[in-house]
Image (tube, rainbow, N blue to C red):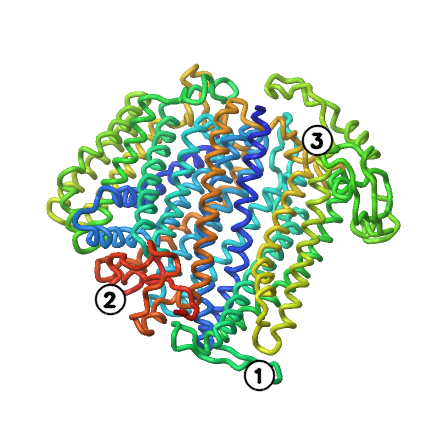
Amino acid sequence: MDPLDIARWQFGITTVYHFLMVPLTIGLGAMTVYFQARWVRSGDDRWLRMTKFWGKLYLINFILGVATGLVQEFQFGMAWSEYSRFVGDVFGAPLAMEGLLAFFIESTFLGVWIFGWGRLPKKVHLTSLVLAVTASWVSAYFIIVANSWMQHPVGVELVDGRPVLTDIWAVLGNNTAIAAYTHALAGSLAVAGGFLIGISWYHLWRRRRDGIDTVGADGQVIVGESSQVPSRDRTDHSVWISSLRIGAVVAIFGFAAVSITGDIQGKLMYEQQPMKMAAAEAACHTGTDFSVLSLGDPGTRDCSSIVTVIEVPGVLSFLAKGDFTTEVPGITELEPQYQEMYGTTIPDDPRYGAHAGTEVQYVPLMWVTYWGFRLMIGLGAISAFAAAVALWLTRKGTVPSSIWIMRLAILGIVAPFAANSAGWIFTELGRQPFVVAPNPDPSGVDGVFMYTAAAVSPGVTAGELLFSTISLTLVYGVLAIVEIALLVKYTRGGVAAAMPELAAHHDESDDHDDGDGPTDGDGADGEKPRKAASDDVLAFAY
Amino acid sequence: MEPLQIVWFGAIAALWIGYLLLEGFDLGVGMLMLVGVRGDAEQREQDRRVMLNTIGPVWDGNEVWLITAGAAIFAAFPLWYASLFSTLYVALTLVLLGLIMRAVAIEYRGKRNTDRWRTMWTWALGLGSFVSAFGIGAALALTTTGLPINEYGDREGGPLSWFSLGAVLGGLGVVGFSIVHAQAFLALKSDGPVRERANRFARSWGLLLLLPIVGWVLQVQFLSGSVWSWALVVVAVLALVGSIVAAFRRREGWTFVGMCGFLVAGAAAIFTAAFPVVIPSTLDPAFDLTIMNASSSSYTLGVMTIVASFGLPLVLAYQAWSYWVFRRRVGPESIPAAHTVTPAVHQDA
């Protein structure tokens, strides 16, 4: 097997996986800050419960993001040593800044927050979460700066064939980075919004199914209380309805921001990477029409089999340039231009191994770019629409009793995640065959580019790459199951799952059925009811 | 040799020392979860929770020293980063798997109240800590004793051609140090049986476990030591003697400080002896990577110097504050009862 292919699959798998955790961390962190701030200001128990419940899910997700983030940093050096040598002067800097200025703050203050309940003054405790979450937003900025430099290299000049950093502000202020960063943040808010809607919907539905909440003749909710289940009181209802409606507003706002920033990105892509733009459209010939549906051989890299089924005139020009008449260059026009500017073969240097002297394929895998682009937009729009519907359906204080709408709401959690992944796959694969994309427009630095085929580690064997790819994929697979199982467990547990004190106030005798079968729960050692010690700072943690 | 190259060699040495100093004890606590507890099942579980909670608030912050050390090598000496990480591919893959398992184990271990669940994560934590400590120790040792790299900085001779006595010595060195350091930490930070056991340990097994790291220090000294690096070795020995004396007098704070002094001086001795070479080539000294031929441009180093001179003092300040916030000992009485999560639904008969 070709080490290049394995290394690329590995990078794809580990990055897409890591990026499942990150948007939820970024979005849900911000929501938790909001909830805790409301609690500190008002003292209202509802906000405390929301902080603890959503904070617990936040932590379960956060740790997997941390654990898989480490792989990201290591694999540049491990699998892509030629890349690391080529871009080292500029690419390492934002990574080191991310460590120094973001990760330290994030992890230190999150530790303070987890263990600081009841130990620190409320405002100091809140500040520790604010710092941790802000730092996670800052870290997203630095990593996107690094990625955007690969999409649009700026702030460097070529010295002896290598880019040398000359202007750090150009790198940090890269227009591609600003657009991609705001786009990713907005996408993260959409993810958190969908997460809040789905889970809150489930609990409101459960309260109705259990007969705790009922609906009056006017359709307004009549909130009830259950003496049977810990924490199923009136406050519990307001926890879920507030979470749901806040989540819906955030999701709609997130999608609006995603659209605006995505539009800016499209216009930059037209200038900076016209081939990616054309591949996203499966646009073979220069024109102005946006394809809603094109069909063809899925594996194709040429245009002979592409049949455009539905087209909307002028929209492509609007995406690219903001008007309806600009001719957007198609693949058949661009390919010869690329060949003329960057050559037709990979340099015939033994350092490029089996790839030396091979022909360069300038058209990215079109079915991935085409459908990646559409999946991103389509799923994003669907989740925003669903959020609007959720706001409407819950206007009288609870959710419909239909189990199918509840299931849809749960399923709706997945859509923004998938939209995010599709977006990244589109933008990264659309950059191929380059790892550092050349930018024909004048704002890019002429001649700074690198073929992906030239970037892998020359000394590393296919066997090593296969070993790490398989073992990481297996571990990631198991951990995905574990994380989802824990999220489901704590979701089903409701607020009492994150606040044992609520359950403790309740009758302690019905603490038996764990709902997980006979191996779980009962009979475990150390389960004797013990009053929390006065110095109990650990209840939230281990 | 430019001043900034020296500055960054020093900064990276400081980041690695910070990492070993801080994560040393939480890696050690992780390993001791497997071998360091006694008594019946209930007692063992209580001890484990006490141990885990001594590192709970700080372990994640400690690990960032590793991330930042790695990224700083990338930023300041990209050729060092590329050669080191690609050469030790297999070892670092295992380190990554170990670090993933232990991070997840710390967070998830208490999230379900069953014995099987806890046992599974205890093993993940213990083994993950062992593998990471060993692999990082081996990798660090090899950057000081040599790797089979050619004139391009790429490895010759297959996936395991780096494996050597130096790797084993470094690996065992960090494992052994972490366990001793963790016992000193537990004696200082816990109460009850864990504290008692940690105190006894420091007086009995400690020295034996420190032999490999001492061996690594001496190996580097004989390879490339200077007057300055030998002077640091003397300081390390003095700190170690101080730590032992304090352990016998049951001065837990001073025992821990002594261990810290031993690590800082010992690791500084290693880096001082290695300077200015960052990876010696075992194939030909002409292929050695040094701070001169492996570094970024002076502009990049300058930018990073400004960032670090703001960032690092700040990191030290708030991490110190977080240790101060959690300065109280963790004893059995501060561990709340395990809590079973039940679904929030009506329990129909």
Residue bearing mark 2: A530
Which label number is shown at residue A46?
Answer: none
* Mark 1 residue type: Gly
**What distance separates the C-alpha of mark 3 from that of mark 2?**
69 Å
- Whichever of callouts 1 and 2 sits on the residue coming sooner in the sequence is 1
* Residue A381 is at least partly visible in this image: yes
Considering every residue shown, the one lying at the far front of the view is B349
Please give the chain letter of the residue carrying mark 3: A
* Residue B231 is at least partly visible in this image: no
Asked if A354 appears above or below A440 in the picture, the reply is above
Q: Residue at x 31, y 34 (%)?
A: B267
Q: Which quadrant of the figure contains the C terminus of chain A?
A: bottom left
The foreground one among A316 and A376 is A376
Looking at the image, residue A298 sits to the left or right of residue A436; the answer is: right
Spot occupied by residue A86 in the image (x, y as percentages of width and height) = 59, 30
Tags 1 and 2 on a common chain: yes
Q: Which quadrant of the figure contains the N terminus of chain A?
A: top right
Name the image quarter holding residue A230: bottom left
* Mark 3 residue type: Gly
Of tags 1 and 2, the one toward the viewer is: 1
**What distance separates the C-alpha of mark 1 from that of mark 2?**
42 Å
Circles 3 and 2: CB distance less than 8 Å? no
- Whichever of callouts 3 and 2 sits on the residue coming sooner in the sequence is 3
* Mark 2 residue type: Arg
Which label number is shown at residue A447?
Answer: 3
Please give the chain letter of the residue carrying mark 1: A
Considering every residue shown, the one lying at the far left of the view is B249
Q: Residue at x 62, y 26 (%)?
A: A454
Looking at the image, residue A538 sits to the left or right of residue B329; the answer is: right
Q: Secondary structure at mark 1?
A: loop
- Whichever of callouts 3 and 1 sits on the residue coming sooner in the sequence is 1
Residue bearing mark 1: A216
